[in-house]
Image (cartoon, helix red, strand yellow):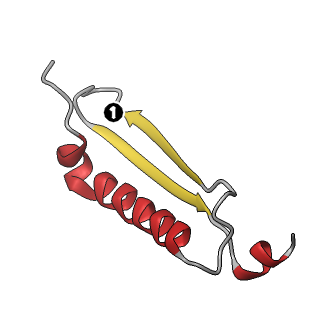
C-alpha cells in the first residue's frame, strides 16, 4: 500500500477544508474583540465507505466543523 498524503486525498478537497477551518480559527483568535484565553475547537470527521467489489474504490465524506467565539460570547464574562 502506498503512503497516504493528505494533500492528495479526495483530490485535495479534505486538505482544503481543513486549511480553511484552521484559518478561521486563527482569525478568530487574532480578533481583539474575542477572549484571548478561551479555547476554540476544530473537529474533523472522515467517513470511509469502500466498494464491496473493489476495495481500492472508497467514497469519503469529510465534515469539518469549527467552534469559535463570537462577540456576544466574549462579552458574557
On the image, the x and y values in percent for residue 48 come to: 42, 36
On the image, the x and y values in percent for residue 77 come to: 87, 69
What residue appears at the point 49 percent right and 55 percent down from the top-left corner?
64
What residue appears at the point 54 percent right and 66 percent down from the top-left corner?
29
Q: Mark 1 points at which residue?
A: 51
Q: Is residue 48 left or right of residue 1?
A: right
Residue count near mark 1 (Cα–Cα under 10 Å), binned few <14, some 14–19, many ≥20: few
Q: In this view, does 26 lie to the left or right of 43?
A: left
Q: Residue furthest top?
A: 1
Front in this rendered view, residue 61 or 28 = 28
What residue appears at the point 50 percent right and 54 percent down from the top-left corner?
63
Q: In this view, does 10 lie to the left or right of 20?
A: left
Q: Which residue lies furthest to the left in this view?
A: 2
On the image, the x and y values in percent for residue 38 come to: 69, 57
Q: Quadrant of the N terminus?
A: top left
Vertical position of residue 53 compared to residue 72: above or below: above
Q: Quadrant of residue 68?
A: bottom right
Amino acid at each position: 500500500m502506498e503512503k497516504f498524503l493528505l494533500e492528495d486525498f479526495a483530490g485535495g478537497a479534505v486538505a482544503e477544508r481543513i486549511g480553511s477551518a484552521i484559518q478561521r480559527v486563527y482569525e478568530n483568535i487574532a480578533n481583539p474583540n474575542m477572549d484571548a484565553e478561551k479555547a476554540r475547537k476544530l473537529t474533523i470527521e472522515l467517513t470511509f465507505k469502500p466498494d464491496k467489489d473493489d476495495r481500492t474504490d472508497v467514497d469519503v465524506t469529510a465534515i469539518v466543523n469549527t467552534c469559535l467565539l463570537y462577540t456576544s460570547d466574549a462579552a458574557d464574562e
